[in-house]
Amino acid sequence: MEGTGRDPLGLSRVSDSLTNFLLPSIITTTDRARYYSFYTWAIADIQALREAKNGKVVFEEEFQRREAAFALASLMGRRTELPIVGVRAVEGALASPDEEDRLGTAFRVLPSNTTGGYGQYYGGCLHALGLVQSDSEGDLVVSPELGRRLAAAFAAATASAPYRAEGWQTRARVPKKTLQKSAKLYSLDALGGAEAEQERELLIQLFFDLDKSPSPTRPLNRQATLGLFLHLLRSCAESGVEVTRRTVDDDAIFWPHYYAGLEDGESGFLPYQTVPAFTGVQNFWRQFCAHQFLAVALEEFLAGVLGVLAAYPEGLPKASLLDEMMATGFIEDMEGVVGTPCGTPAALLAAIGINGVPGVDESIAASRRFHGGAAVNEWKVFWADDGAAETSLGQTFLVLAILYARWRGRSDDDTLLQVEQEAGKELWLGTMFPWLDGWTTDRPSWRDAVEALLDWITMRHEQVKFQKRKLDASWFEVANGRYIRQQDIEANTRASRHSNATTILQDLGLIEHAGLDDPLRLTERGNEVLNEVIRLRS
């Protein structure tokens, strides 16, 4: 399935739209701050060389030499365990010096891309930030303002490195000792050094927009999201709650922004409230979380279908598939979680306090009922140690019911309405509301509800497959009236990009460098930047 995407129902589309809106120019493949300045400098350096040689320069060759040398020096001068682009190819080059102990730099750090990490990961972000652009000839150049300033700051920070001071960047082979001596300045981890202070501060200004205040037409959501993240980490430290890089996508998103609390193994659920400067962006992250619960619920239903079909390689006709799904025990599973009979979908809604299409008051009451510390909520249905639903179908219908109760009536929530407008025809929470309304008006049986969702999932799966123009991206097929399993799926949430933001903020000296399972703590500079962002947004 390489290249076909693990998204059979197109549920990543709204997730990606929200993260692009809330955390632009930091994506799931950009996790080191200095690549933003290094690639800007490399393009500027090649631009100057091209001008000096009247255009007689092969950009890709020059780029590869600079990037390979930077990667080699970064590996030799590594002070953290944070990633280096193309580390496998770089390790091979490092282990293969020639007779004169020189290392080759004329290679692609990523074999599939002629411009390495820039072409594969960072290029779009640098363009979006206004650091680089294409000229009238189609050549990459730095922007005349911020791009030149950042390239100059990198050049100043690395000027004393022998690799640069001795002009090795145009050479295809470089003495190993030269790169070793250069690593103190010309490497990823060197961004934390005193020589790189100006470069580091420019990057902080870039990511946090420290020269700007938000306005209705310019919300500066990256500034707000990163500020909210720093505020959360400060609150965690004050409360004795640990958030690690391994758990940041969960602990820094779902508990504080969806449930307004901090989850602590010893103290239980602790309330969390951000400052007014970040309330607006926090509301959008709450909708991101709601969409993740929907995504997992629908993919769990698909997983339940595939789990049944796994025992029948020849497939099953629809009626037999429904029989098998009804025999999974999901109704008893739900009854065990909510503690009351759930013989119909309407009975399940009634069990959680919903006896008709909910309005504002009913949905607000449901949010209070299924709070972060409650015995039952969306998170715990999927992942609690005790009390989680055990069947895929039980998880699906429980979470759909809770989401419906919590959000169906929230016509007063401006953020929900804005997400609805932006989502358009894409699959999101509001897509399910009309169908779930029917649970109270039409009062279907569970078999009818399962069949309706199966039909809808089948239609959506086919639609997404054709939209991708990748007909091999299939989890099941319907042929001659039989449902046939193609592959399994593991339902999961989509990345919030906070893991990538964490390593960038560590590189910038705003969060203390720590291991994957160590608590994240703000530095003194991190607290200063947080206070500045709050001031700008107040």
Image (cartoon, rainbow, N blue to C red):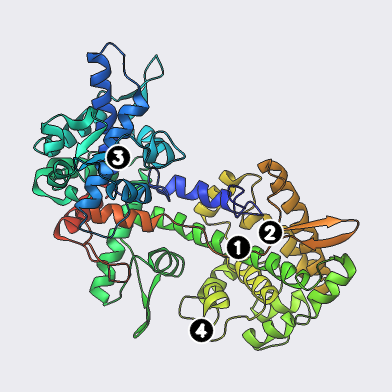
Q: Nearer the viewer, mark 4 or mark 2?
A: 4
User: How far, Cα to Cα, is label 4 from label 2?
Assistant: 28 Å
Residue, disc 4 = 385
Marks 3 and 2 in Cβ contact (< 8 Å) = no
Q: Nearer the viewer, mark 1 or mark 4?
A: 4
Q: Which mark is residue 68?
A: 3
Q: Amino acid at mark 3?
A: Ala
Does residue 145 show up? no
Marks 2 and 1 in Cβ contact (< 8 Å) = yes
User: How far, Cα to Cα, is label 2 from label 1?
Assistant: 9 Å
Q: Which mark is residue 302?
A: none
| Closer to the camera in the image, 516 or 350 | 516
| Closer to the camera in the image, 538 or 44 | 44
Question: Does residue 151 lie above or below 103 as drawn?
Answer: above
Does residue 83 show up? yes
Residue, disc 2 = 432
Residue, disc 1 = 294
Q: Earlier in the sequence, mark 3 or mark 2?
A: 3
Q: Nearer the viewer, mark 3 or mark 2?
A: 3
User: How far, Cα to Cα, is label 1 from label 4?
Assistant: 21 Å
Q: Earlier in the sequence, mark 3 or mark 4?
A: 3
For residue 289, side relative to residue 503 (left or right): right
Q: Amino acid at mark 1?
A: Leu
> Residue 378, position in %: x, y?
55, 72
> Residue 300, position in %: x, y?
65, 68
Q: Nearer the viewer, mark 2 or mark 1?
A: 1
Residue 211 location, quadrant: top left
